Amino acid sequence: MARVKRTLGPRGQRVRRDGCGGARGGVPSTRCIGGDPAPPYALRPLLMPSHDLLAVPESRAFPLRRVLQRLLAARRVVLVTHVGADGDGSGSQAALAAWLESRGIEAAIVNPTPFPDLFRFCLHRQDVVAEMGTPEGEAALADADLFVVLDTSEPPRVGAMAERLPPERTLVVDHHPAGTEVVGDTAVQDPSAGATGEMVYDLITLAGDAVPHASALGAYVAIVSDTGSFRYSNTTPRIHAVAAELLGRGIDPEVVYRRMFATAPLRRLELLREALATLRTDPEARIAWMTVRADTATRLGATGEDFDGLIEHVRSIEGTEVAMLFRETGEGDTKVSFRSNGAADVNRLARRFGGGGHVKAAGALIPGGIDEVAPPVLAAARNAG
Ligand code: AMP
Ligand code: MN
Ligand code: MN
């Protein structure tokens, strides 16, 4: 098992969460993990020209350099993201894979669940994805000398991959708040980054390299995806500056927009129609939710990525503090997505049910069907809202 306690590995080895490792003893580890609180963003554009915005904050650069050092010493690297890969996970993988190969380091993307068709346009070569359980995937896992987990750090979030990751050869690059367990022995976890893709951009620039075109595309898709197209509260002046650099590498924002948002299979709209028919609100508790049962998803042939963004319709209802989407996976569990519009901390809410995420966007995979799962979750949300 690759499950590693916060400070001790399975064989009692010390786990470095931040890469500081005492090499520069004066740097407190909390700075390496999270970074200092940013100055008020309203002031920063006045104080900082955009090239300064692009400087990698030292608290992030320090542990990223250690990741870089280990990457550059590797020959075959497997890149992993969380179950139900989203645009940040997939785009970050695509970006890192293209850059590694530009450096002559072989890369393979192996995930616990299939790489989404929606994000295949980011890949610099289609066969860089090797699905787990296929001969290619198994060969990539067997041959790898290093593993990088992107956009999560927690064993349950990488599903069946958790037991395939040797902690001493696994690095983590993630922007989620640290959970209780971490899959690798060197983890850069920086919630001040708006997307993991922003950190992958930082890694490439710390290497002193120009960002290859395919890496720019992946990083841009990652950023657009996790900032809700530069609308959520993780949209910072810096992430805009990074996006501007990426556009400067020849990325066409309209092409990306069309691929990501303006083209959808018919079933995705049918799913929206059926989900909206289940919409419920509790105006007093300021919560709203939708449900999608397994038979509906099966009938429509809906894939995981078809659900991305569905919850934003619930979140948009005036007066809603906490929005939820309950979706039966067809394997006996219910995936609950949570979104907050302000005060409520849905990361905390999701953690009560074994999940996690960010303050304003979180999720949990809960055993049982909707009829079992929804009542206790709704009760907890009524108190959180
Ligand atoms: P989603 O609702 O799937 O779009 O996820 C929103 C946020 O919650 C993302 O940051 C995810 O990484 C996180 N998240 C989703 N599902 C889980 C889970 N089962 N456990 C922990 N975090 C999750
Ligand atoms: Mn993600
Ligand atoms: Mn992310």
Image (cartoon, grey):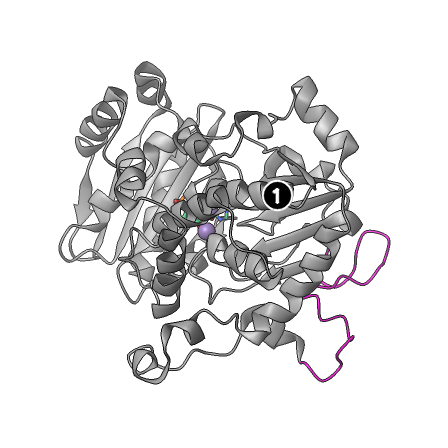
In the rendered image, the quadrant that contains the C terminus is bottom left
The residue under label 1 is 102
**Residue ID at (78%, 41%):** 145
Residue 278 % position (x, y): 20, 33
Q: Quadrant of residue 137?
A: top right
Q: Considering depth in this image, is 232 or 182 the residue closer to the camera?
A: 232
Question: Is there any visible trace of residue 328 in the rendered image?
Answer: no
**Residue ID at (67%, 64%):** 65
Q: How many marks?
A: 1
Residue 307 % position (x, y): 33, 34
Q: Considering depth in this image, is 301 or 239 the residue closer to the camera?
A: 239
Residue type at the position of mark 1? Ser
**Residue ID at (32%, 14%):** 299
Boundaries of the magenta span: 5-27
- The secondary structure type at the circle numbered 1 is helix
Prevalent SS, magenta region: loop
Classify residue 213 as left or right of residue 149: left
Asked if disc 1 is less than 8 Å from ligand 3, the answer is no
Q: Within 10 angstroms of label 1, few (less than 14), some, or many (20 or more) residues?
A: some
Q: Is residue 110 above or below residue 239?
A: above
- Furthest toward the left, the residue is 318
